[in-house]
Amino acid sequence: MTLYRRLTIIILVSLLSIILDQATKSIAAEHLPQYSYADDSQSYIYDTVRIGYTENSGVFLGLGNNLSEEMRFGLFVVLVSLLLIGLLWYLIKNQELTRLSLTGLSLVFSGGVSNLFDRITNNGAVIDFINMGIGSLRTGIFNIADVAIMLGLLLFILFQPKEVKNK
C-alpha cells in the first residue's frame, strides 16, 4: 500500500474516532449525573446499558488509581505518549499492513490519543460514561475511545498481514 493511501486511512480513521470520542465525552460531562453507584446512572434496554459520568485516573477497570500522581503521569502520559509515537511510526512505515489491519491499528492509535488528551487536559483523568451487562455481571465503565481500541485490536488480529499469521 502506498504511503499516500496509508496516511489517508490513518488520518481519516483517527480524526473521525477522536472527534466522536471527544464529542461524546463533552456531552457526558455536561449532561450526565456523576456515576458513583448503580442508582446514579441512567438505565436503558432493560438495564443492559447504563450511562453516567465518572472520571478514571487509572487505566482498565481503575487499575493504577492508587499510584502516586507522579507515577501515573510517568506511566499514563509519558510512557503512553512514547508508545503512541512508536505506533504511528509503525503505521506510516509498514507497507505490508492490509487495509483492515491498518484501520484497526489506526483505531487503537486514535483511542489512545483521545484518552491521552483527556489525561493532559483533565488533571490526569479520563472521562468514562458507559457500562454494559446483565444483572450483576457488568463491564467496567468505559468510553468511545476504549471501544475504538478494542475494535481496532480485533480488526488487527483478524486481518493482519499473512506473513505475520504464518510466523
Image: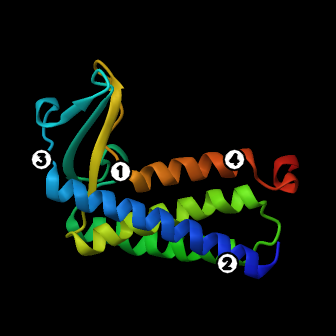
Residue where numbered disc 1 is placed: 143
Sequence-earlier tag: 3 or 4? 3
Q: Is residue 40 above or below residue 2?
A: above
- The secondary structure type at the circle numbered 2 is helix
Is label 3 or label 4 in front?
3
What distance separates the C-alpha of mark 2 from that of mark 4?
Answer: 21 Å
Q: Position of residue 81 (x, y in %)?
A: 45, 74
Asked whether the beta carbons under mark 3 and mark 1 sit within 8 Å of each other, the answer is no
Residue where numbered disc 3 is placed: 34
Residue drawn at x 29%, y 67% as measured from the top left: 71
Residue where numbered disc 4 is placed: 157
Please, what is the three-letter code of the amino acid marked with disc 4?
Answer: Ile
Residue drawn at x 72%, y 74% as measured from the top left: 6
Q: Is residue 69 above or below residue 34?
A: below
Sequence-earlier tag: 1 or 2? 2
Residue where numbered disc 2 is placed: 7
Is label 1 or label 4 in front?
1
